[in-house]
Amino acid sequence: MRKYLFTLLFGLLCSQITLAQIPSQVRVLDSDITITEGGRAKILQKYNSLTRSPKHYQEYAQRCNTYFPIIQEAMKEHGVPSDFKYLALQESALRAEAVSRSMAVGYWQFKIATARERLLRVDGDPDREDVDVDERMNIYNSSHAAAVYLKRNAQYLNGSWIYALLSYNLGLTGCKNYIRDNRLNPMRIVVDENTHHYIIHFLAHYFAFGDSNIENKPPYLVPMEFVNTTFSKVSTTTGTPIENLQEYNKWLKNPDKIIPNDKIYSVVVPANSVDDQEVLMALSTSFKEELKGTRNTSAVYVPEVLELYPFIMDVAPDSTAENRALISVNGLKAIYAQKGDTPEKLAQAGEISEMEFLAFNYLTADASLEEGAFYYLEKSPDEILLSTFHIWEEGDTQESIAKRYGISLEGLRKLNGLKEGEQRQKIFFSRN
């Protein structure tokens, strides 16, 4: 009876917050956000729906306690804000078996094409009973895939994590259009009653399930890497009952099947105490030594992704003498060429040397510029976070591909083992 009254009181305390308790300024996703009164009212409405039921709130909080540490580590490894853990909660309530109306599946609600683009294995038709693997339901692997996806999107949205969040719902092109149509400044985030509901809902989850509300209690999940083995052997090795392994590893549809040998798979093993957790972590380290050198080298060609390159956004006019409007192309500072422009003129507008301008755009000193085309004003990176590859087409050159995707020519050659002028059917953009 006492436990019931405590749970009821806890639920009432959660739900009975006022508008004044939603702050007007908050720093989340490495962004300073201003929230108007109208925006706070919208957030409060969603907040109260999340906390109204003590039973459901506690179920969500327990999942946060269980899965957030793995998500945080994945985000940290890829240089992504850990606050994105609330996005997984928003997307799936941290349930492996969650399925949306659009047939997105798992913790991060990946559709099949997106999952495979991110190198997650999804066998055949997930509705069939003979499917062996669906990594969208693997908390470790899917969280790393989500981190890479979010980081890539932020790169093409002027480094804005808030709009990388929105792109998770709208897609890159849809997010770009939303920013343009609403005349938003990616560098100054104001949330009001007209802000996209996806951002409103994220902030509601952030306030409702902040770390101060989450107890640090078992089970603790330890990711362990395996290949070409069975859950039975994992159970014997770790001393974990096989039904506990099944509960946290629904990605292997049939636990009696062998874990495939096409790449390393992470099996999360529950520990009931800090001591057990430390033992499993030490055991995991020894397994990693045995598996060293094994890695997945596959990638998927998704033609639709080519439509995103180059990804161009208008930005505020530059403060040069000519006051030329600059653009962001593939996350890099760039400028459009106008009639009569020369490399020297555009270099001056971008406040760089003519030699740098020519190098950034793979041009010779006597090159003529194409009116209406874009030209980079900074050096492209040697690797970009894109797991899909480019299929060489007629008319392609190494230089044209490098410029289209915003990768340095040196990096493109090194990643693909290309000599100057050499062609290759598939062009990769990262080591993954």
Image: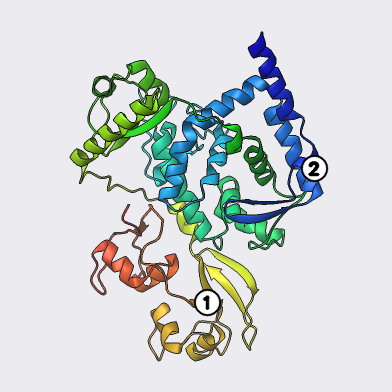
* Residue 147, x across and y down, in percent: 46, 47
Density class for disc 2 (Cα within 10 Å; few <14, some 14-19, many ≥20) is few
Quadrant of the image occupied by residue 314 = bottom right
The residue to which callout 2 is attached is 20
Which residue is at the far top?
Answer: 1
* Residue 53, x across and y down, in percent: 69, 22
Which residue is at the far left?
Answer: 290
Q: Residue at x 71, y 62 (%)?
A: 183
Q: Amino acid at mark 1?
A: Ala
Density class for disc 1 (Cα within 10 Å; few <14, some 14-19, many ≥20) is few
Q: Is residue 202 left or right of residue 52?
A: left
The residue to which callout 1 is attached is 373
Q: Amino acid at mark 2?
A: Ala
Given residues 424 and 217, the one toward you in this image is: 217
The secondary structure type at the circle numbered 1 is loop
Q: CA distance from mark 2 to mark 1?
A: 50 Å
195, above or below 248, in the image: below
User: Which mark identifies residue 421?
Assistant: none
